[in-house]
Amino acid sequence: MRTVLVLAAIWFFTSPLEGEVAARLCERRGGELSSDSGDAPHPPAGEAPATSPSKGEVKDDPTLEAVDALAADALKAFRVPGAAVVVVRGDKTLVLKGYGTRAAGAKPPVTADTVFPLASCTKQFTTALLAMLVDDGALAWDDRAKKHVPVFKLSDPNADALLTVRDLVSHRTGLGGHDLLWYHAPWDIDETIKRAAALPLEYPFRGGYRYSSIPFMAAGRAAEKAGKDSWEKLLRARLLEPLEMKGVAFTTAEATKSTDRARGHRLGKTGAPEPMPLYELKEPNPSGSLHATARDLAAWLQFHVSDGVAPSGKRLVSVKALLETRTGQNLMRLDDASKRLFPDTVQMSYAMGWVVSDYRGLKVVGHGGLYDGFRVQITLVPDRDLGFAVLTNLHDTRAPMALTNELIDRYCGLKSKEWIAYYRKIVDEDAEAKKIALAARDKARDPNAKPAVPLADLVGVYTHPAYGRATVALAGGALTARFGGFVCPLEHFERDQFRITDGFFADELATFVVKGGKPAALTLAGIEFTR
């Protein structure tokens, strides 16, 4: 079963491994099976504080029962075991509830205090911290990056000389996604940052958009140098404690101490949710390691809706600095695939840890997060003083996107466009297209086209300047390739191509290049290793 971690995302996008690995793995936008699991959502659990009129309220806000019904519909349509939903307007929390269960087939319900990984929604916390350091005069958005994080370098010396803090957090450095440089990598974040210097740029510096978490890691190190403390200590002291976000954890080990923690799931072959192996985030990661509860996110949303004020009334960051993080910096082109996902959006741009777009005439600011077994969405509608968060414990599901759109429609007085059914249809179409493409590939295969050299000749070590070594071994008449933390059993497909039969890259093809009767290269997971 293919899996994808993506501590990433954009408004309703999610990052690479979606993008780079995910484009190949059909992740980014789907992959769920359409068969019915037969599991109906459990009754809602948690809290829903009373509401009162405030700025931006429409004539008829949805009732709490209507929100419950939407959440139940989304969980059922996408086979999600459990979710938490937050809606705030101004300083009022309109919805703060859990739905379904923390684990499929188990009784403990999701509550307002259930811990979920935030994945790439961590990025908006890092840029809020940077905004505070801008207020302090400790750094500026347009400072050269080398001033604060000299160890991070781009392979193009001209781009490297011009690289700024702003570039690090707006996905315009020229680097591609390269999630496999950190996901399941045998080295730490600092080593990932160093190795980025060996990666060729995939597009002109400041001349395009590619989602990449690695520059955000470097931005976290820049914050540490400017703030004279670790990223996690700065974030806790300057943001989390003043906002009373008591459930936040920085690593998997810290998160698993909670007894009220959601378990990750993926859809199995029957279409029913099944447990997904836990991916351990061993160290605090400024691009994606935060975990939090719905209650924590209610405080986070109110902080943003108030443009930087804590519950105590104390201003934590200037309006100017905070709004800069939510101001578009880098245009994101809406291709046909994007238009299909965002049919009511005309323009979209990446800000700094947020995506800014229009939605049915409204300005919307948001970001998604994808992590093994989970998907989350955090969204602001600034002109209505509204904030939304949807946390789910199912891998790469469209439920957060669909439910967020439904909530925006209702709280902004717009006629519903039946988003749950709309995205369910996209999921089913994508799954069928993937099935057809795989069948066509296999049908076109020539199984009699043998490798150019004996299997034993393909054994050995192949290298990449950034990714390091990939080793190929032969045992029992079959090849196995290994790199980073991945094991890829290989089965001959045709000529010098081999199908990966199990693991993260199952069904993908690995290709050897043979020159002069000797193996010269191996392309594995889109990475070319040479000999």
Image: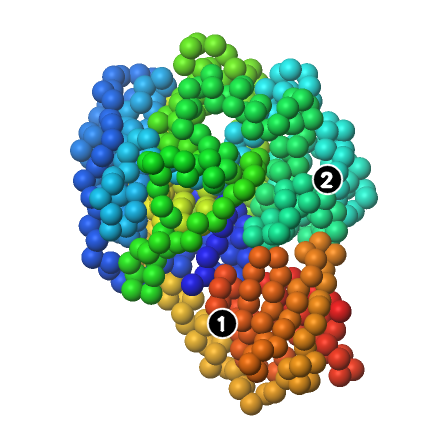
The residue sitting at 47% across, 19% down in the picture is 241
Q: Which mark is residue 41?
A: none
* Quarter residue 162 falls in: top right
**Residue 310 versus residue 198 in the image, above or below:** above
Q: Residue furthest bottom?
A: 448
- Kind of residue at badge 1: Thr
The residue sitting at 46% across, 57% down in the picture is 3
Point out the image quarter for the N terminus.
bottom left
* Local crowd size for mark 2, using a 10 Å CA cut-off: few (<14), some (14–19), many (≥20): many
- Kind of residue at badge 2: Phe
The residue sitting at 62% across, 27% down in the picture is 230
The picture places residue 46, in percent across and down from the top left corner, at: 25, 31
* Quarter residue 115 falls in: top left
Quick check: 339 left or right of 127? left
The picture places residue 134, in percent across and down from the top left corner, at: 64, 20
Q: Is residue 179 visible?
A: no
The residue sitting at 34% across, 22% down in the picture is 89
* Quarter residue 44 falls in: top left
Say whether disc 2 or disc 1 marks the residue closer to the N-terminus: 2
Task: Determine which residue is flagged by label 2.
Answer: 152
Query: Nearer the viewer's eye, disc 2 or disc 1?
Result: 1
Q: Is residue 42 visible?
A: yes
The picture places residue 330, in percent across and down from the top left corner, at: 60, 38
* Local crowd size for mark 1, using a 10 Å CA cut-off: few (<14), some (14–19), many (≥20): some
Task: Determine which residue is flagged by label 1.
Answer: 501
Q: How many marks?
A: 2
Q: Nearer the viewer, residue 287 or 431?
A: 287
